[in-house]
Amino acid sequence: MSTALSVNSIANRQVYSWKEWAALLLSLGKIRISLLVTLSTATGYLLAAEKVAIQMLLPAAAVFLLACGSCALNQFQERKIDALMERTKNRPLPSGRLNPSSGLFISLGLISIGSFILFHRANLLTGMLGLFAVFWYNGIYTPLKRKTAFAAIPGALIGAIPPALGWVSGGGSLLDPRIWAIVFFFFMWQITHFWLLLLDFGEEYEKAGLPSLTRIFSPTQLRRILFAWVFATAVACLILPLFGLVTSYAVRVGCLIAGFWLVLRTARSLIAQNSSLSFLPPFHTINVYMISVILLFSLDHLFR
């Protein structure tokens, strides 16, 4: 209640402090998602270049701007739907703290700056991959969510593009089988990430008129399906050494431990008897797992 009142009081004001503007921009750009996208880009660069280089900062910064801009554009596209759901109604646009035209202007500005950096300071292929990611997220996945509950499957390509972008900017080739193994792993994780988040708010999606898996499958079926995807994500990570990636013994062991931790922890909440229907605990678990794997990948060259 107090949060809603504070949001309304801010929305009724004409002038914001710099701290309030910063909070608005961070919320509009979905900062946590954008940072994770940036980390996956840096991981692709490190795996291709096999070293830490200051040159990786430029594509990483450009991808961060693109991700923030794309997330902001997504909020502009879904502002009316967001206003109908408890989870999203306090976002900048549906809450009225920021008007739609300003949100659109900010999103296009961030996308333009990020694209300019990639095209003029990286290379043509990197820039094309960046724009393709924006197109797929805002032009394909976002409208597809209104038509099918399975939109997360084609939408998961969004999570697979940033590491490929980092790989190319690090000197790698898209014809290299290793990048496709990396892309597959991030693709599997992205599907699980999407579904674990969306399923916890299935009723809200239904009230907002959006298709939801909660209408198609029973709670027990959903738990089993999600556990299968979680298990497959862990396996997709463990096959990377077969492609010549993650060559350090210490990092391989670390990935194995992380995979066992992920499977055991999610099994407890997804398929254990008398478990609650909430999907948020496994959602947080798989995100911690992904960050751990990214850090392990980044350290691989140090242990060789």
Image (tube, helix red, strand yellow):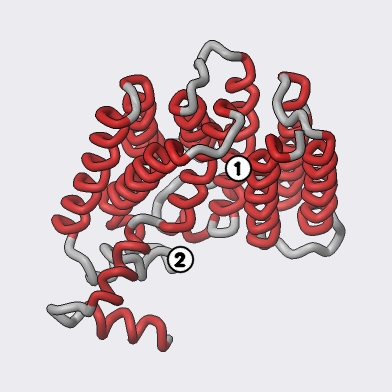
In this view of the protein, which residue sits in the foreground, 51 or 281?
A: 51
Q: Quadrant of the C terminus?
A: top right
Q: Quadrant of the N terminus?
A: bottom left
Q: Residue furthest top?
A: 175
Task: Using the numbered discs, state the Cα–Cα distance from disc 1 to disc 2 in whole angstroms.
Answer: 22 Å
Residue 194 has which mark? none
Q: Is residue 182 left or right of residue 296?
A: left
Q: Tell which tag, 1 or 2, sits nearer the viewer.
A: 2
Q: Is residue 64 left or right of residue 233?
A: left
In this view of the protein, which residue sits in the foreground, 275 or 237?
A: 237
Residue 212 percent coordinates (x, y): 52, 47
- The residue under the point 78% across, 33% down is 248
Residue 59 percent coordinates (x, y): 39, 37
Residue 87 has which mark? 2
Amino acid tagged 1: Ile
Rendered position, 145 above or below 75: above
Q: Which residue is mark 1?
A: 216
- The residue under the point 26% across, 52% down is 76
Rendered position, 24 above or below 292: below
- The residue under the point 85% across, 51% down is 264
Q: Is residue 68 left or right of residue 259?
A: left
Mark 2 residue element: loop
Mark found first going from the N terminus, 1 or 2:
2
Residue 89 in view, yes or no: yes
Residue 106 percent coordinates (x, y): 21, 53
Number of labels in the image equals: 2
Mark 2 closeness class: few <14, some 14–19, many ≥20 residues within 10 Å: few
- The residue under the point 41% across, 36% down is 141
Q: Where on the picture, by quarter, is residue 15?
A: bottom left
Rendered position, 3 above or below 166: below
Q: Is residue 50 left or right of residue 220?
A: left
